[in-house]
Image (spheres, rainbow, N blue to C red):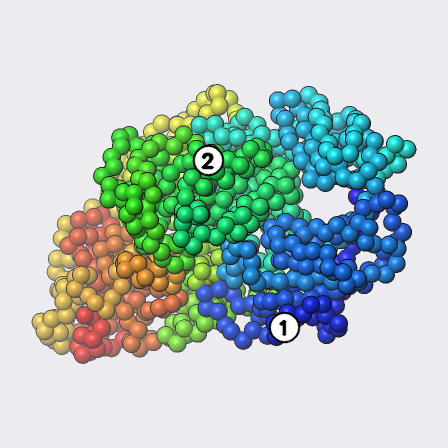
Amino acid sequence: MLTKINLAGEWKLLIDEEHTGYTLPESYNDVIDLPGTTSHARKGPKNDNKLIGALTDEYLFEGQVWYAKEVEIPELPEGGNTLLYLERTRMTKVWLDGEELGSRNSLNTAHIYDLTGKLQAGRHTLTVRVDNTGYPTKGGHLTSPDTQTNWNGITGRMEIQIYGAAYLSDIRLDPELAERSVMISAALNGTGAASVTVSAESFNGETVHQAEERSYAVIPGALNVRYALGEDALLWSEAAPNLYKIRLTVKDAEGQETDRQEVIFGLREFGAAGDKFTINGAKTFLRGKHDGLIFPLTGYAPTDVEEWVRILGISKAYGMNHYRFHTCCPPEAAFTAADMLGIYMQPELPFWGTITTEADENHNQAEQDYLISEGYAILKAFGNHPSFVMMSLGNELWGSREKIDAILKEYKEFDSRHLYTQGSNNHQFMPEILEHDDFFSGVRFSRDRLFRGSYAMCDAPLGHVQTDLPGTMKDYDDQIVPPDFRNASDAELSSGATIQIQYGTEAKTVQVGDGSGEWIPQIPVVSHEIGQYATFPDFEEIVKYSGSLKAHNFEVFRERLESKGLGHLAKAYFENSGQLAMDCYKEELEAAFRSRRLAGFQLLDLQDFSGQGTALVGVLDAFMDSKGLITPEDWRTFCGDAVVMARFPKFNYASGERFEASAELAWYRAESPEFFHLHWALKTEQGILAEGAAKAGASGEANYFDFGAITALLPEVEVMRKAVLSLWIEGTDVRKTYDLWIYPQQNKDPLSGVRVFDELSDDALELLRQGENVLLMPKPESLENAIEGFYCTDFWCYPMFRSISESMNRPVPVGTMGLLIDNVHPVLRGFQSETHSTYPWWNLVENSKSIIMDDTANDWSPIVQTIDNFERNHKLGFLFECRVGAGKLLVCPLDFRKVQDTLEGRQFLSSIAAYMASDEFNPQHESNGEELRQLIH
């Protein structure tokens, strides 16, 4: 363009609160600063509702809002063209001086209106009506109260663009890596164009490169030129995000400029080769973050590059190189920031549903046409950005595979600069790779071929992080490419059958298509929405919600906790559930890096998710601020472009046992040394137990390197000790630590001499009346007033998946979040512990229940309690004590017969026995038989 008129600033405002449907208002009753939204400006009726499952929009308004502005127009070029450009809005209709100009409905791209011939120098009235109801589609995370809210306004650039008699539109830059050139195509609008001059200058890199300026003779209609950047052109990648400013100048026959355009460009080729993605021919591994456009201070996505550089920069500090936008597309500023930082972006159509055909019931052709057109609009608007490398048709789609594949085919024919997938986790239990899929994004290939570490109970079977004895052996290679194939587990899911599935945040019965059986993927496989490990809320966060979105959900959760007399434990619940979640994420992510057939993952999530019941699954809060659970440096030890790992089957070892592991390295950095030198050491507080070194050659294009065995004869110890295995790669920042535990020689009958009962019998109560010490270990299966033991923290959000499981008549999740341990209590003197769950507790928890102690006195605090979720807020006793008459009682609802066959179980029981035999066994709370019978049943 030649110039532009910035329309940002004060606009007249009329909110149609009565939904009268004005034709064109004669007067306005308020003003508003745009860009922005009515909610963020606190305009309109106040919303008195308080959402529990999401943040509350304090000034939510859904309907028609009118915005008007007087605009002074200067002298325009003779024969010139003018466009109105409105970035990032809802459904709009525009009037100029009372004349209706038309309407636009894109939720993802700018609304552009042609004002040519309608503007002259002088004062004009521009009126825009924005409607945030009646969308052509539900809108996914673009319009959801769970994410950026259903705002009304205009949030991006607002301008009148002024061009000469001829101008370019729909500019498209196709990189040609081998030729070190770019194919430039565009529509050449208007009249009088004689030439287009092209120049390119690099920026955003360590080296500056300038391509020779060239001019091309043109005729009106279309521009198609190949522009050589030169043999020394700089390439774009995550490691070196070199960019160019491609400048295009249109001139008429007299040499006068009629248009100037500047487009950011990166010379790159993002592809798929076998089971991996490639960037400029080199393999890369996607370390992805889910994003649903959650911005708690504004309720809408920012449209300035600086803010997106900050946001994406935080993710990059945590090792991420990829963003998957869930049923949404971010503003252009996000792509520009990703260009600058080297982030691989995947927008997604705003759809979470079923792709039907005309023969299907409830087929909506208009919605389908709209969604397809939105895909083309996204490709046209943002496709030049080198960071835009992938696109998905939606989230967890069902329906016609043939129709989905046909849409893929059309997109690929239209724009081959990107890779495409049918959707994210389509057809859930019955996925199938389609002909035109460039990559596959999902969580399983069949019921038992799982390639993610955790699942909801309604989507069982659960993942290895939730069910398996902790170790570091798991990878997904045999699930992606099984050593043999069997159809037995899915035989019942034949064509025409129906199954119940999780469908968004609800349940739905769907018909199964043709059974896909077992097959081997021939394209890259991305693990979808991995993680989802929940933490307890941090109520200190509430004060941060100073914008129009209020955390009334957090306030309700806090009130619930306080009503149970547990409010003083809120911070401890948050911190200790958070530490368990970090351990779960470590194993989840390492399993992905150990999987040599996996192409990447998309984490759910690095940040908390404000909606869907309130899913506090982040390392960061919803504001992208640290929750204080782990540093970026420590997170990158298991999530980065280079990860060193050790494989071993367990974390608990006996005195004198030989520790055996194998060491390996996943390396996706641009540069590799000739050799990788590994160093390792096994230490306790008393000193180094063993150490060693190994090396591996970095030849060829390999990304995985094996260092061989690590072995160490563990010492004889008199007490339980924690050891730390450290690994590091010489000359790099690549490191890793693992905590191990070593146990002393143990009595095979650790409770000998202790009066142990597995039920609260009359005999047990009589001994207590006589002043004896009693250990009560009720059989977990006999307890009804108790919650099942489950080591892993809750998946995503208990209220949401409890509801889904109930509606599907499936088991509800356990819903707990690990342990809160009084680790200085003398009963644990022989069982070294942190205040949070660690792997010595795994067998104990999995063979136990925790007793619901809601009706007990507030000052009766368990020594070890299980942290419940924010919906139930039970006080859960795993280990607690009391006086009963003259006697002393210790209660632990643990199957001691099972756990005494394990090292950690015997050590725990030994510690209990030693405590009960000591003078330190001195419970302060007093109870009685009647209370205990009501409690323990």
Structural crowding at the residue carrying mark 1, measured as other residues with C-alpha within 10 Å and reported as few (<14), some (14–19) or many (≥20): few
Residue 541 seen: yes
Q: Identify the residue at image location x=29%, y=43%.
A: 495
Residue under numbered circle 1: 20
Residue under numbered circle 2: 437
- 898 or 911: nearer the viewer: 898
**The C terminus is located in which quarter?**
bottom left
Q: Against 743, is 174 above or below?
A: above
The image shows residue 916 at horizontal and vertical percentages of 20, 64
- 786 or 258: nearer the viewer: 258
The image shows residue 650 at horizontal and vertical percentages of 29, 42
Which residue is situated farthest in the front direction here? 359
317 to the left or right of 927 = right
Label drawn at residue 747: none
Q: Identify the residue at image location x=28%, y=66%.
A: 877
Residue type at tag 1: Thr
Q: Identify the residue at image location x=54%, y=26%.
A: 281
Residue type at tag 2: Asp
